[in-house]
Amino acid sequence: MEIRAKESGGRLTLYFSGELDHHAAKEVMRRAEDLLDRYMPLDCTLELSGLSFMDSSGVAVILRLYKRLLNTGGRIWLENPQEQPLRVLDISGIERLVKITTTAKERGR
Amino acid sequence: MNSRNYIKIELPSRSVNEGIARAAIACFAAQLDPTLEELGDIKTAVSEAVTNAIVHAYPDSIGRICLRGRIMTSGELEISVRDWGKGMEDVEKARTPLFTTGGPERSGMGFTIMESFMDKLRVRSKPGKGTTVVMRRTLEKRRED
Ligand SMILES: Nc1ncnc2c1ncn2[C@@H]1O[C@H](COP(=O)(O)OP(=O)(O)OP(=O)(O)O)[C@@H](O)[C@H]1O
Ligand SMILES: [Mg+2]
Protein backbone atom coordinates (compact mmCIF):
# COMPACT_ATOMS: atom_id res chain seq x y z
CA MET A 1 0.00 0.00 0.00
CA GLU A 2 1.38 3.39 -1.01
CA ILE A 3 0.26 7.01 -0.63
CA ARG A 4 1.40 9.90 -2.80
CA ALA A 5 0.41 13.48 -2.03
CA LYS A 6 -0.26 16.48 -4.27
CA GLU A 7 -1.29 19.89 -3.00
CA SER A 8 -2.72 22.83 -4.88
CA GLY A 9 -4.69 25.83 -3.64
CA GLY A 10 -5.42 24.51 -0.16
CA ARG A 11 -6.64 21.22 -1.55
CA LEU A 12 -4.72 18.07 -0.81
CA THR A 13 -5.06 14.99 -2.96
CA LEU A 14 -3.86 11.69 -1.56
CA TYR A 15 -3.37 8.95 -4.17
CA PHE A 16 -3.88 5.53 -2.61
CA SER A 17 -2.51 2.49 -4.38
CA GLY A 18 -2.25 -1.19 -3.50
CA GLU A 19 -4.31 -3.09 -0.95
CA LEU A 20 -5.79 -1.46 2.15
CA ASP A 21 -6.47 -4.12 4.79
CA HIS A 22 -5.78 -4.48 8.51
CA HIS A 23 -2.14 -5.28 7.75
CA ALA A 24 -1.65 -1.98 5.91
CA ALA A 25 -4.02 0.16 7.99
CA LYS A 26 -1.68 1.30 10.76
CA GLU A 27 1.04 2.51 8.40
CA VAL A 28 -1.50 4.18 6.09
CA MET A 29 -3.04 6.02 9.03
CA ARG A 30 0.36 7.21 10.25
CA ARG A 31 1.40 8.36 6.81
CA ALA A 32 -1.93 10.11 6.07
CA GLU A 33 -1.88 11.88 9.44
CA ASP A 34 1.68 13.08 8.78
CA LEU A 35 0.57 14.52 5.45
CA LEU A 36 -2.48 16.20 6.99
CA ASP A 37 -0.23 17.74 9.67
CA ARG A 38 2.22 18.95 7.05
CA TYR A 39 -0.26 20.49 4.59
CA MET A 40 -3.17 21.34 6.94
CA PRO A 41 -5.63 21.26 4.04
CA LEU A 42 -9.24 22.44 4.17
CA ASP A 43 -10.30 19.94 1.57
CA CYS A 44 -8.79 16.54 1.10
CA THR A 45 -9.47 14.15 -1.77
CA LEU A 46 -8.63 10.49 -1.51
CA GLU A 47 -7.99 9.38 -5.08
CA LEU A 48 -8.63 5.64 -5.08
CA SER A 49 -8.20 4.59 -8.71
CA GLY A 50 -4.98 2.74 -7.83
CA LEU A 51 -6.51 0.95 -4.85
CA SER A 52 -7.06 -2.65 -5.92
CA PHE A 53 -8.50 -3.98 -2.66
CA MET A 54 -10.12 -2.67 0.50
CA ASP A 55 -12.07 -4.26 3.37
CA SER A 56 -13.69 -3.07 6.59
CA SER A 57 -10.30 -2.07 8.01
CA GLY A 58 -10.04 0.39 5.11
CA VAL A 59 -13.48 1.80 5.85
CA ALA A 60 -12.31 2.43 9.42
CA VAL A 61 -9.23 4.29 8.11
CA ILE A 62 -11.39 6.53 5.92
CA LEU A 63 -13.79 7.20 8.81
CA ARG A 64 -10.92 8.22 11.06
CA LEU A 65 -9.53 10.57 8.45
CA TYR A 66 -13.04 12.00 7.96
CA LYS A 67 -13.40 12.69 11.70
CA ARG A 68 -9.95 14.19 11.87
CA LEU A 69 -10.66 16.65 9.08
CA LEU A 70 -14.08 17.46 10.54
CA ASN A 71 -12.35 18.50 13.78
CA THR A 72 -10.29 21.09 11.92
CA GLY A 73 -13.25 22.27 9.85
CA GLY A 74 -12.14 20.42 6.72
CA ARG A 75 -13.85 18.00 4.40
CA ILE A 76 -12.98 14.79 2.66
CA TRP A 77 -13.97 13.26 -0.69
CA LEU A 78 -13.42 9.89 -2.28
CA GLU A 79 -12.64 9.73 -5.96
CA ASN A 80 -12.70 6.94 -8.54
CA PRO A 81 -12.86 3.77 -6.44
CA GLN A 82 -12.54 0.51 -8.39
CA GLU A 83 -15.35 -2.05 -8.33
CA GLN A 84 -14.33 -4.07 -5.25
CA PRO A 85 -13.63 -1.11 -2.93
CA LEU A 86 -16.84 0.51 -4.17
CA ARG A 87 -18.92 -2.51 -3.17
CA VAL A 88 -17.41 -2.39 0.33
CA LEU A 89 -17.97 1.37 0.57
CA ASP A 90 -21.60 0.91 -0.57
CA ILE A 91 -22.36 -1.64 2.14
CA SER A 92 -20.68 0.46 4.81
CA GLY A 93 -23.09 3.35 4.25
CA ILE A 94 -20.13 5.73 4.47
CA GLU A 95 -21.61 7.77 1.64
CA ARG A 96 -23.91 9.47 4.15
CA LEU A 97 -20.78 11.13 5.54
CA VAL A 98 -18.25 11.12 2.73
CA LYS A 99 -19.03 11.91 -0.87
CA ILE A 100 -17.89 9.48 -3.54
CA THR A 101 -17.36 10.82 -7.04
CA THR A 102 -16.58 8.91 -10.17
CA THR A 103 -15.20 10.80 -13.11
CA ALA A 104 -14.83 7.73 -15.29
CA LYS A 105 -17.87 5.71 -16.27
CA GLU A 106 -21.32 5.81 -14.68
CA ARG A 107 -21.70 3.96 -11.42
CA GLY A 108 -23.30 0.57 -12.01
CA ARG A 109 -26.54 0.09 -10.01
CA MET B 1 -16.52 -37.49 -0.17
CA ASN B 2 -18.88 -34.64 -0.91
CA SER B 3 -16.27 -32.32 -2.31
CA ARG B 4 -14.70 -32.28 -5.74
CA ASN B 5 -11.55 -30.53 -4.68
CA TYR B 6 -10.20 -28.86 -1.59
CA ILE B 7 -7.31 -26.89 -0.17
CA LYS B 8 -6.26 -26.65 3.44
CA ILE B 9 -3.73 -24.15 4.74
CA GLU B 10 -2.49 -23.43 8.21
CA LEU B 11 -1.29 -19.92 8.99
CA PRO B 12 0.04 -18.18 12.09
CA SER B 13 -2.09 -15.17 13.05
CA ARG B 14 0.27 -12.56 11.62
CA SER B 15 -1.34 -9.70 9.71
CA VAL B 16 0.88 -10.29 6.67
CA ASN B 17 -1.11 -13.51 6.17
CA GLU B 18 -4.33 -11.60 5.43
CA GLY B 19 -3.17 -10.89 1.89
CA ILE B 20 -1.71 -14.36 1.52
CA ALA B 21 -5.03 -15.95 2.57
CA ARG B 22 -6.94 -13.81 0.03
CA ALA B 23 -4.52 -14.71 -2.74
CA ALA B 24 -4.59 -18.43 -1.90
CA ILE B 25 -8.39 -18.63 -1.97
CA ALA B 26 -8.58 -16.54 -5.14
CA CYS B 27 -6.14 -18.96 -6.75
CA PHE B 28 -8.19 -21.96 -5.61
CA ALA B 29 -11.49 -20.40 -6.75
CA ALA B 30 -10.05 -19.67 -10.20
CA GLN B 31 -10.87 -23.24 -11.33
CA LEU B 32 -14.58 -22.29 -11.11
CA ASP B 33 -13.98 -19.52 -13.62
CA PRO B 34 -15.45 -16.76 -11.43
CA THR B 35 -16.27 -13.27 -12.67
CA LEU B 36 -14.12 -10.39 -11.38
CA GLU B 37 -17.00 -9.34 -9.16
CA GLU B 38 -17.36 -12.83 -7.68
CA LEU B 39 -13.62 -13.00 -7.06
CA GLY B 40 -13.70 -9.60 -5.36
CA ASP B 41 -16.56 -10.70 -3.11
CA ILE B 42 -14.82 -13.94 -2.13
CA LYS B 43 -11.53 -12.19 -1.37
CA THR B 44 -13.33 -9.61 0.74
CA ALA B 45 -15.17 -12.25 2.78
CA VAL B 46 -11.94 -14.21 3.37
CA SER B 47 -10.14 -11.04 4.40
CA GLU B 48 -12.82 -10.26 6.98
CA ALA B 49 -12.84 -13.74 8.50
CA VAL B 50 -9.04 -14.06 8.67
CA THR B 51 -8.64 -10.54 10.05
CA ASN B 52 -11.16 -11.37 12.77
CA ALA B 53 -9.14 -14.40 13.78
CA ILE B 54 -5.96 -12.32 13.88
CA VAL B 55 -7.46 -9.34 15.71
CA HIS B 56 -10.10 -10.85 18.00
CA ALA B 57 -9.24 -14.52 18.51
CA TYR B 58 -5.59 -13.94 19.38
CA PRO B 59 -5.42 -10.31 20.60
CA ASP B 60 -2.06 -10.60 22.39
CA SER B 61 -0.46 -13.69 20.97
CA ILE B 62 0.24 -15.52 17.76
CA GLY B 63 -2.09 -18.47 17.26
CA ARG B 64 -3.04 -21.00 14.67
CA ILE B 65 -5.53 -20.31 11.87
CA CYS B 66 -6.84 -22.99 9.53
CA LEU B 67 -8.12 -21.82 6.17
CA ARG B 68 -9.99 -24.25 3.99
CA GLY B 69 -11.54 -23.99 0.56
CA ARG B 70 -13.80 -26.68 -0.89
CA ILE B 71 -15.66 -27.15 -4.11
CA MET B 72 -18.81 -29.10 -3.37
CA THR B 73 -20.25 -31.66 -5.76
CA SER B 74 -23.02 -29.11 -6.29
CA GLY B 75 -20.36 -26.73 -7.64
CA GLU B 76 -20.72 -24.43 -4.65
CA LEU B 77 -17.57 -22.90 -3.19
CA GLU B 78 -17.19 -23.30 0.56
CA ILE B 79 -14.62 -21.43 2.61
CA SER B 80 -13.96 -21.98 6.26
CA VAL B 81 -11.74 -20.11 8.68
CA ARG B 82 -11.05 -21.70 12.04
CA ASP B 83 -9.17 -20.50 15.09
CA TRP B 84 -8.54 -21.88 18.56
CA GLY B 85 -8.58 -18.49 20.27
CA LYS B 86 -10.79 -16.42 22.51
CA GLY B 87 -14.19 -17.31 21.09
CA MET B 88 -17.47 -15.44 21.55
CA GLU B 89 -20.17 -15.54 24.23
CA ASP B 90 -22.98 -14.44 21.97
CA VAL B 91 -22.58 -15.06 18.26
CA GLU B 92 -25.95 -13.54 17.33
CA LYS B 93 -24.99 -10.29 19.00
CA ALA B 94 -21.53 -10.31 17.38
CA ARG B 95 -23.18 -10.64 13.96
CA THR B 96 -25.31 -7.52 14.47
CA PRO B 97 -24.22 -4.75 12.07
CA LEU B 98 -21.88 -2.23 13.69
CA PHE B 99 -21.38 -4.37 16.81
CA THR B 100 -17.71 -4.36 17.76
CA THR B 101 -15.53 -5.01 20.77
CA GLY B 102 -12.65 -3.32 18.97
CA GLY B 103 -11.75 0.35 19.25
CA PRO B 104 -11.79 3.10 16.61
CA GLU B 105 -9.73 0.87 14.35
CA ARG B 106 -12.76 -1.40 13.85
CA SER B 107 -16.10 -0.56 12.34
CA GLY B 108 -18.15 -3.63 13.27
CA MET B 109 -18.87 -4.49 9.67
CA GLY B 110 -16.95 -7.71 9.10
CA PHE B 111 -19.84 -10.15 9.58
CA THR B 112 -22.22 -7.90 7.65
CA ILE B 113 -19.82 -7.93 4.69
CA MET B 114 -19.37 -11.73 4.86
CA GLU B 115 -23.14 -12.14 4.98
CA SER B 116 -23.89 -9.92 2.03
CA PHE B 117 -20.98 -11.01 -0.18
CA MET B 118 -21.58 -14.73 0.33
CA ASP B 119 -24.80 -16.78 0.03
CA LYS B 120 -24.54 -18.51 3.40
CA LEU B 121 -22.67 -17.81 6.61
CA ARG B 122 -22.46 -20.12 9.61
CA VAL B 123 -20.56 -19.19 12.76
CA ARG B 124 -19.77 -21.58 15.59
CA SER B 125 -17.94 -20.31 18.63
CA LYS B 126 -17.19 -21.19 22.23
CA PRO B 127 -15.53 -18.86 24.72
CA GLY B 128 -12.00 -20.02 25.40
CA LYS B 129 -12.20 -22.69 22.70
CA GLY B 130 -12.31 -20.86 19.39
CA THR B 131 -14.39 -19.98 16.38
CA THR B 132 -15.24 -21.51 13.03
CA VAL B 133 -16.71 -19.42 10.23
CA VAL B 134 -18.10 -21.30 7.24
CA MET B 135 -19.23 -19.45 4.13
CA ARG B 136 -20.70 -20.65 0.88
CA ARG B 137 -21.17 -19.03 -2.46
CA THR B 138 -22.63 -20.40 -5.67
CA LEU B 139 -20.76 -19.08 -8.66
CA GLU B 140 -22.71 -18.28 -11.75
CA LYS B 141 -22.32 -20.97 -14.36
CA ARG B 142 -20.52 -19.56 -17.34
CA ARG B 143 -19.30 -22.67 -19.12
CA GLU B 144 -19.98 -26.39 -19.23
CA ASP B 145 -17.58 -28.79 -17.58
N1 LIG C 1 -12.65 -15.13 15.37
C1 LIG C 1 -13.19 -14.40 16.38
N2 LIG C 1 -12.84 -14.67 17.67
C2 LIG C 1 -13.36 -13.95 18.69
N3 LIG C 1 -14.23 -12.93 18.53
C3 LIG C 1 -14.61 -12.60 17.28
C4 LIG C 1 -14.12 -13.32 16.14
N4 LIG C 1 -14.68 -12.78 15.03
C5 LIG C 1 -15.48 -11.79 15.46
N5 LIG C 1 -15.46 -11.67 16.81
C6 LIG C 1 -16.25 -10.70 17.62
O1 LIG C 1 -17.34 -10.25 16.84
C7 LIG C 1 -17.33 -8.82 16.73
C8 LIG C 1 -17.88 -8.40 15.38
O2 LIG C 1 -17.02 -8.81 14.32
P1 LIG C 1 -17.02 -8.00 12.93
O3 LIG C 1 -16.01 -8.57 12.05
O4 LIG C 1 -18.43 -7.92 12.46
O5 LIG C 1 -16.62 -6.53 13.40
P2 LIG C 1 -15.17 -6.01 13.88
O6 LIG C 1 -14.14 -7.02 13.57
O7 LIG C 1 -15.30 -5.59 15.30
O8 LIG C 1 -14.95 -4.73 12.97
P3 LIG C 1 -14.49 -4.72 11.43
O9 LIG C 1 -14.67 -6.12 10.91
O10 LIG C 1 -15.40 -3.75 10.77
O11 LIG C 1 -13.07 -4.30 11.43
C9 LIG C 1 -15.88 -8.44 16.99
O12 LIG C 1 -15.76 -7.11 17.48
C10 LIG C 1 -15.47 -9.48 18.04
O13 LIG C 1 -15.91 -9.10 19.32
MG1 LIG D 1 -13.99 -7.88 11.69
Image (cartoon, rainbow, N blue to C red):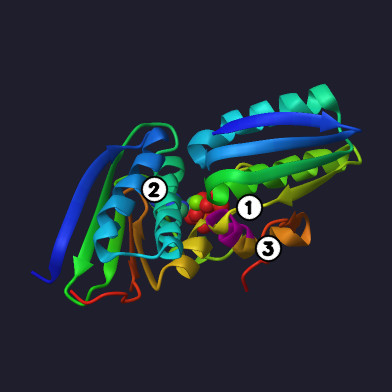
Q: Name the residue under label 2.
A: B50
Quadrant location of residue A38? top right
Tell me which amino acid carries mark 2.
Answer: Val
How much space separates mark 2 and mark 3, taking CA atoms? 23 Å
Determine if residue B75 is in view: yes
Residue A26 position within the rendered picture, expressed as x and y whole percent measured from the top left? 58, 32
Looking at the rendered structure, the kind of residue marked 1 is Pro
> Vertical placement of A109 versus A26: above or below?
below
Magenta-span inclusion, residue A40: no
Q: Main secondary structure of the magenta part?
A: helix
User: Residue A81 has which mark?
Assistant: 1
- Identify the residue shown where x is 27% and y is 50%: B67
Question: What span is in magenta?
Answer: A84-89
Q: Which chain carries label 3?
A: A
Nearest the viewer among A74 and B10 is A74
Circle 1 sits in a helix, a strand or a loop, which is it? loop
